[in-house]
Image (tube, grey):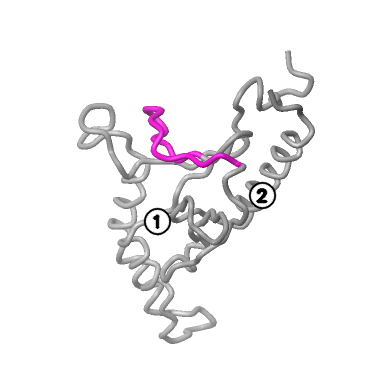
Amino acid sequence: MQAIAGVSPAAVRESTVMVVWPSICAGPWGRWLGRWYGVRAGVTVAGVPLTLGWAAVFASIPLALLLYFDKKVPRIPLVFVGWSNPSCRRYRLTNRRVLVEHPFEGTLIASLPLDRFDEVRVETLPGQAWFNAGDLVFMQEGVERLRLPGVNRPEPFRQTCLKTQQARLGVLACTPQA
């Protein structure tokens, strides 16, 4: 039984704290679209801005949808039958580590324990600003340990990672090690 619903000690069980899915701007085509979407050249008609960026948004809807579903569809060419889609992944923070995984197969792609980084940076690459996204870079002593590309609204996830790490390290410091 758990004293608080959904909360269990890391020594007992690994529990999910937060899950985020990468934006389409995690890849080069999405960042390319983001650069186009950010173009502000245009005119204002009756108080409505008509820019090249917004024209690009409407013109690229089919491509943007393909990029979006490429991040969500577990198998290619059919959703349930075919080869595993390497673009389909999610980022999961647990009470022990940060995971990059294939969400539907449960395949672990990469992981980083919470005690293996001392800094989390947000790097906004060209084309990601329009999507309000960025890469989360986990550093240890100035060396990159893990990069999560295209995280939507990266600052809340960054703060949650740091708070979860602080809780984990606090518990480890108070617990006698065997």
Q: Position of residue 138 (x, y in %)?
A: 54, 53
In-front residue for pair 152/178: 178
Helix, strand or loop at mark 1: helix
In-front residue for pair 122/81: 122
Where is 107 relative to 116, above or below? above
Residue drawn at x 47%, y 84% as measured from the top left: 45
Where is 89 relative to 131, above or below? above
Residue drawn at x 50%, y 60% as measured from the top left: 133
Between disc 2 and disc 1, the foreground one is: 2
Where is 87 relative to 149, above or below? above
Location of the N terminus (image quadrant) = top right
**Which label's residue is closer to the chain start, 2 or 1?**
1
Location of the C terminus (image quadrant) = top right
Question: Callout 1: 10 Å neighbours few (<14), some, many (20+)?
Answer: many
Residue tagged 1: 26
Helix, strand or loop at mark 2: helix
Q: Report if residue 101 lies within the magenta region.
A: yes
Residue tagged 2: 162
Q: Is residue 25 left or right of residue 144?
A: left
Label 2 to label 1, Cα distance in Å? 22 Å
Residue type at mark 1: give it: Ala
